[in-house]
Amino acid sequence: MTMESLPPPDSHELSKVMGLLREYAEKLRLLCEDRIKFKHRQVLIIVLGTLSGVMTILTVTLIMNSTRGESDAKDAIPLMALLAGLVVIPPIFVLIRDRTKPYAVHQVAATVERMIRMASQYGEHAMQSVGDRFEFDIRLAEAEASLRLYEEVFREPKRQLN
């Protein structure tokens, strides 16, 4: 059944379509924002982990140089290795963790994309007043913006062949 064969929608149907469009666009936007926050935390943890590892190595080096020939320096090596491990291991777990359920995000994005197409067709036949048309255009623009954000955040960059 095509859109041309459907009877003109009433305002209840129109508000239902706009509500669904708003709901799914908002859900997609929130999932994208969560992913952006995760990427920012990831970078911060890498930087802090690297700085902590470097500081630990410098500390071990200074202790080794200041206590040459003493048995305390050799006793401190396992302790410093443990400290370095404790500093570096947590960032690794944070980097492995997360992965914002990509299937769910891709599914929501596909739903929003389909809803945008259907809503565009529906909107051509549904508008009875200027206010309805204005609200409908705003909802459609919000959904399209959410979809563009999804494309920026979740799509892998295409690799160029040399």
Image (tube, rainbow, N blue to C red):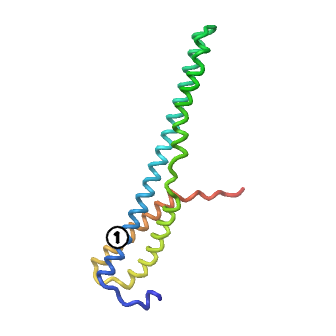
| Extreme-right residue of the structure | 162
Task: Give residue 16's position: percent from left, percent from top.
Answer: 33, 76
Snapshot quadrant of residue 119: bottom left
Assess disc 1: are there few (<14), some (14-19) or many (≥20) residues with their C-alpha within 10 Å of its C-alpha: some
Residue picked out by circle 1: 138
Relative height, residue 77 to residue 16 (above, below): above
What quarter of the picture does the C terminus occupy? Answer: bottom right
What residue is shown at x 31% (from left), y 85% (from top)? 10
Relative height, residue 44 to residue 39 (above, below): above
Front-lying residue, 39 or 104: 104
Task: Give residue 112's position: percent from left, percent from top.
Answer: 45, 69
Front-lying residue, 33 or 131: 33
Count up the numbered dots: 1
Secondary structure under badge 1?
helix
What residue is shown at x 39% (from left), y 69% (from top)? 141
**Amino acid carrying mark 1 in the image:** Ile
Q: Is residue 71 left or right of residue 29?
A: right
| Extreme-top residue of the structure | 69
Front-lying residue, 25 or 103: 103
Task: Give residue 86's position: percent from left, percent from top.
Answer: 53, 31
Task: Give residue 18's position: percent from left, percent from top.
Answer: 35, 74
